[in-house]
Image (cartoon, rainbow, N blue to C red):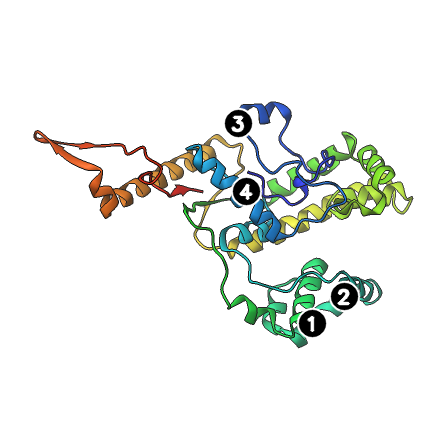
Amino acid sequence: MNCDSVAMYREFEIGTAKPTPEERACVPHHLFDVIEPTAYVTAGEYARQARKVLDEIKMRGHLPIVVGGTGLYLRALLDGLFPGPQRSEELRERLRERADKKGPAYLHRMLCRLDLEAAQKIHANDKPKLIRALEICLTSREQMTEMWKQGRDALQGFRVLRLGLNPDRDALYERINERARRMFEEGLVEETEHLLRTYGDSARPLGSLGYKQAVQLLRGEVTRESAIAAAQQAHRNYSKRQMTWFRREPEVVWFTGFGADAQVQGAAIERVAMAEGAGLRSQLSGPEGLRNVSRRDSGVELQKQQTETEKPNNRNL
């Protein structure tokens, strides 16, 4: 199941590196190409859709695997979100105008005055998160940090195994640079031109990595080589922020290398198998599990219960 915010949008293909049709034919993929280009999906809406998909996968008796790097979406899925105020487009627009005039750092200083603890967790250049944090503080007249403490609706019915990739930084940056250049070679600018012609600036992902630089190139603001260099730099910066975010997540099992490395794949499969085994032992050690074990002659037999009410209701995620 996808956990990349931009990959949820239809018609955004080259800049998102979605699974190919051949890859999707091998195993069911979920939450790709489900949002119109002009729509907006919040982390809360993602969590609602994703939890529904997880339940459907679980009902089919399969193991759901969530893949992607949008940290806030994953946190919303697993931990839930606090009951914050509704979006205010009018307030957001005013905050965007101030950021355009005075820079994102101005918003960060505002947040420091309103909620220092929240400001310390948000990068001074992360305009979307700064705007949302300020929107919450100004609309609710409460600190976002205090609202977080009110409790959230965490995911129920699953045991979670978190696997993270930690490749060598130089090798990672080399891949990032190559991928950014390849996107331009494979038609990113042409795809962006089509999206601009069809939807104009209302297509929200046009401000995302790669597409933003392609838009600047189409408008004559930069040269092709400088657009590629800017896209490479933006992706490298984003990878740093991702690593910082996920290192704060609890109980992540880190693997040194890339996901395509055979050694990493083997180690990951082994950890999943260990988690499955631990879950089975946990089920057998409780009252429900004990009812599934009966003595027959001198041996012990595990009896499989197939009714919906008696199936183990926990699966690894």
Q: Quadrant of the N terminus?
A: top right
Q: Secondary structure at mark 2?
A: helix
Q: Nearer the viewer, mark 1 or mark 4?
A: 1
Alpha-carbon span between mark 4 and mark 3: 26 Å
Q: Is residue 90 above or below residue 41?
A: below
Answer above or below: position of 83 versus 217. Answer: below
Position in image of residue 7 (x %, y %): 66, 39
Residue 71 marker: none
Task: Check disc 3 and give the amino acid type.
Answer: Val
Q: Quadrant of residue 185?
A: top right
- Mark nearer the N terminus (1 vs 3): 3
| Residue placed under numbered mark 2 in the picture | 91
Q: CA distance from mark 1 to mark 2?
A: 9 Å
For disc 3, the marked residue is: 27
> Residue 234, how many percent across, how many down?
72, 48
Q: Which amino acid lies under the numbered mark 4 shown in the image of this protein? A: Pro
Looking at the image, do the residues carrying marks 2 and 3 touch, with CB atoms under 8 Å apart?
no
Q: Which residue is mark 1?
A: 138
Compare marks 4 and 2 and give the one earlier in the sequence. 2
In the rendered structure, find residue 167 and report the number of the disc placed on it. Answer: 4
